Image (spheres, rainbow, N blue to C red):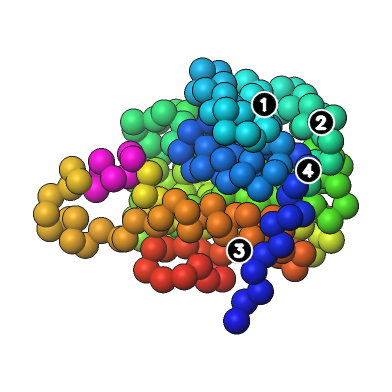
């Protein structure tokens, strides 16, 4: 039987979560704070970040908001410095990402448009990982959030997003031998967040039946926390497809 993760190692440490003000990021922030970590919530949405921080503090947790876009290299470096100045920076969760607000996609948009998506989903995580390598305490962890779009071989509406998320998976395995920080990755399918639930409900009945199962948010946050605290997690790439327990790629 698998040994339960030792969550006490999070107590009185610092965690940095990018894209932490909403969705999966907010769930990760709340989970880490519930285990005694001080969480730095990095997000461009100032109001949402401060609202989440206020809620965590109201419930006895510790968090602070940093308003930044991960594509801003100077601001990202400043955020990592800030997080490491707050105490022992034990974990970084590289969660920020998305389609970049595009409604049309490669090859029907300009290179500037699709490159901006690669910047958000791949270049910024690479830059963050480089910064974290110098800032995270020995024995700490970086967990990267990819997507099933990056490992599937079927057509996908946003090729630039799929390519960038595939890059995150390969980046993780490429640096998997690092002793510190331990770098790992989760590869979730369609996460059961409100937007996904709305999109699923809007599908035609036939499409809804054939849609992949939604992945419970708690399954993803639990796996991220496990990867953070598990001293043997270096190089792990874990798929969560909603059809069963998390499994290695």
Q: Is residue 8 magenta?
A: no
Q: Which residue is mark 2?
A: 86
For the C terminus, which image quadrant? bottom right
Give the residue number, with chain letter if any, for mark 3.
237
- Element at label 3: strand
Residue 180: x and y in percent read 83, 55
Residue 216 lies left or right of residue 18; in this view the side is left
Indicate whether 136 appears above or below 166: above
The numbered mark at residue 92 is: none
The quadrant holding residue 66 is top right
Residue at image x 84%, y 41%?
88
Q: CA distance from mark 1 to mark 2?
A: 10 Å
- Disc 1, disc 2: CB below 8 Å? yes
> Which residue shows up at 37% across the image and 68% down it?
243
Q: Nearer the viewer, mark 3 or mark 2?
A: 2
The residue indicated by pointer 4 is: 13
236 or 62: nearer the viewer: 62
CA gap between label 1 and label 3 equals 29 Å
Dot 4 or dot 2: first in sequence order is 4
Residue 198 lies within the magenta run: yes
Marked residue nearer the N-terminal end (3 or 2): 2
Q: Is residue 17 above or below residue 217?
A: above
Q: Which callout, 4 or 1, points at the residue further toward the start of the chain?
A: 4
- Residue 200 in percent (x, y) is at 24, 48
User: Tag 1, which secondary structure?
Assistant: strand
Q: Marks 4 and 3: which is nearer the front?
A: 4
């Amino acid at each position: 039987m698998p040994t339960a993760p030792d969550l006490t190692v999070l107590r009185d440490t610092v965690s940095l979560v990018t894209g932490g003000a909403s969705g999966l990021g907010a769930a990760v922030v709340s989970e880490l704070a519930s285990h005694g970590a001080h969480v730095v919530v990095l997000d461009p949405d100032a109001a949402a970040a401060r609202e989440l921080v206020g809620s965590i503090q109201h419930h006895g947790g510790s968090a602070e908001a940093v308003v930044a876009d991960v594509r801003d290299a100077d601001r990202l470096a400043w955020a990592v410095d800030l997080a490491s100045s707050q105490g022992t920076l034990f974990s970084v969760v590289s969660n920020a990402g998305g389609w970049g607000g595009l409604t049309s996609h490669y090859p029907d948009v300009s290179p500037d448009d699709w490159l901006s998506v690669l910047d958000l989903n791949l270049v910024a995580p690479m830059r963050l990982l480089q910064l974290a390598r110098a800032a995270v305490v020995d024995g700490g962890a970086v967990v990267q959030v990819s997507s099933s779009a990056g490992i599937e071989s079927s057509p996908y509406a946003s090729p630039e997003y799929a390519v960038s998320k595939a890059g995150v998976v390969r980046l993780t395995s490429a640096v998997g031998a690092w002793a510190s920080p331990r770098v790992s990755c989760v590869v979730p399918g369609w996460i059961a967040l409100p937007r996904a639930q709305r999109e699923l409900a809007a599908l035609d009945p036939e499409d809804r039946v054939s849609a992949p199962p939604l992945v419970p948010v708690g399954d993803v946050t639990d796996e991220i926390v496990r990867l953070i605290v598990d001293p043997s997690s270096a190089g792990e790439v874990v798929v969560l497809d909603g059809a069963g327990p998390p499994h290695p790629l």
